[in-house]
């Protein structure tokens, strides 16, 4: 069975996509067979992965009009299902009582094929993010250490709990990853500590090493590169490598 990991946070700009790309690449480099899935209509993950010429659309797959294998693109960097602009209209396009479980159903045929499925989500907690969480075995919450993130993280904890109770008992909250961190800025250190406190109280871990703030991430993205394919020896790549290793250790892999 695949580990299906969703990156989620209703805030934009907190590092979901950069982390999805780093995780995809880091796992691939370690020899795992990985499928990437971009569920954000903004298609940033697809852009970084140079993907987007898949023949079937993920929304057609969710609607039951195409098989998932038709949507998988075999790119030079691995297998990928690119985003679709139709994702922004998913609430209109897809209705019915089973609508929270459509992705879970769609992923069934590939569940044994890949070691990992890495899912990037839009900056909200709507139908698409719910589908991702219902289909997943794990969720990772990238967050920026600023004061407004704390409440957002708490809301997301609640949502994950509700999904665990009502829709997907297999879902494990794999933890918070602090991103874009500037350890020399006192307020960021304090906020990171506050996030750790609320996470501890909720029984959720925070990954040991934050991902530092580095222009390499933004430069890489503009060149359609994840951190490992752009600057594998940079400090921020080492931060991401430590994160991937810690996740694998937590998964006993
Ligand atoms: N560690 C980092 N250091 C500096 N900039 C970063 C870092 N991680 C992400 N960014 C930049 O911040 C912006 C938002 O990141 P992104 O991963 O797209 O977040 P999200 O998917 O949550 O919106 C992007 O321009 C990205 O290049
Ligand atoms: Mg994004």
Image (cartoon, rainbow, N blue to C red):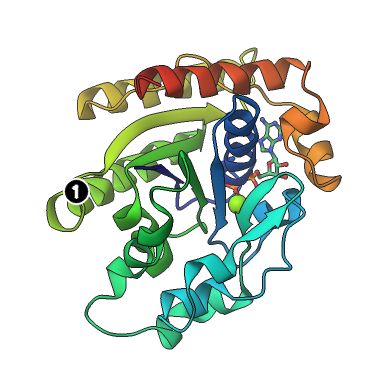
Q: Residue 80: x, y in percent? A: 62, 55
Q: Quadrant of the C terminus?
A: top left
Q: Residue furthest left?
A: 165
Q: From the viewer's perspective, is 165 left or right of 202?
A: left
Query: Where is residue 56, by image quadrant?
Result: bottom right
Q: From the viewer's perspective, is 223 left or right of 153?
A: right
Is residue 60 or residue 206 the one in the foreground? 60
Question: Which residue is drawn at the image coordinates 57% and 31% (left, top)?
Answer: 27
Q: Residue 191: x, y in percent? A: 46, 24
Question: Which residue is drawn at the image coordinates 67% and 16% (left, top)?
Answer: 238
Q: State which image quarter holds ligand 1.
A: top right
Compared with residue 212, is residue 71 higher up or lower down, i.e. above or below? below
Compared with residue 151, is residue 194 higher up or lower down, i.e. above or below? above
| Tally of marks | 1
Ligand 1 within 8 A of label 1's CB? no
Q: Quadrant of the N terminus?
A: top left
Q: Residue 20: x, y in percent? A: 57, 42
Compared with residue 106, is residue 44 higher up or lower down, i.e. above or below? above
Is residue 194 or residue 21 the one in the foreground? 21
Question: Which residue is drawn at the image coordinates 70% and 21% (left, top)?
Answer: 236
Q: Secondary structure at mark 1?
A: helix
How many other residues sit within 10 Å of disc 1, few (<14), some (14-19) or many (≥20)? some
Q: From the viewer's perspective, is 39 left or right of 224?
A: left
Query: Where is residue 201, by image quadrant?
Result: top left
Q: Residue 120: x, y in percent? A: 53, 51
Question: Which residue is drawn at the image coordinates 59% and 40% (left, top)?
Answer: 15
Compared with residue 132, is residue 70 higher up or lower down, i.e. above or below? below
Residue bearing mark 1 = 164
């Amino acid at each position: 069975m695949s580990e299906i990991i969703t990156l989620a946070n209703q805030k934009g700009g907190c590092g979901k996509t950069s982390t999805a790309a780093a995780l995809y690449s880091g796992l691939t480099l370690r020899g795992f067979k990985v499928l990437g899935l971009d569920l954000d209509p903004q298609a940033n993950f697809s852009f970084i992965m140079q993907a987007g010429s898949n023949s079937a659309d993920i929304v057609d797959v969710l609607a039951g009009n195409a098989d998932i294998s038709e949507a998988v693109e075999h790119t030079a960097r691995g297998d990928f299902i690119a985003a679709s602009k139709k994702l922004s209209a998913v609430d209109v396009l897809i209705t019915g009582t089973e609508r929270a479980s459509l992705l879970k159903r769609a992923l069934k045929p590939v569940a044994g094929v890949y070691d990992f499925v890495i899912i990037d989500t839009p900056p909200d907690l709507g139908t698409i993010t719910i589908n991702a969480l219902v289909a997943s075995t794990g969720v990772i919450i990238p967050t920026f250490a600023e004061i407004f993130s704390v409440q957002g993280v708490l809301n997301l904890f609640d949502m994950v709990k509700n999904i665990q109770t009502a829709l997907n008992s297999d879902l494990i909250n794999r933890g918070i990853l602090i991103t874009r961190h500037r350890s020399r800025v006192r307020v960021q250190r304090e906020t990171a500590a506050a996030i750790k406190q609320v996470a501890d109280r909720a029984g959720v871990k925070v990954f040991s090493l934050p991902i530092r703030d580095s222009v390499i991430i933004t430069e890489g993205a503009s060149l359609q590169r994840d951190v490992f394919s752009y600057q594998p020896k940079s400090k921020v790549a080492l931060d991401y490598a430590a994160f991937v290793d810690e996740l694998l250790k937590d998964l006993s892999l």
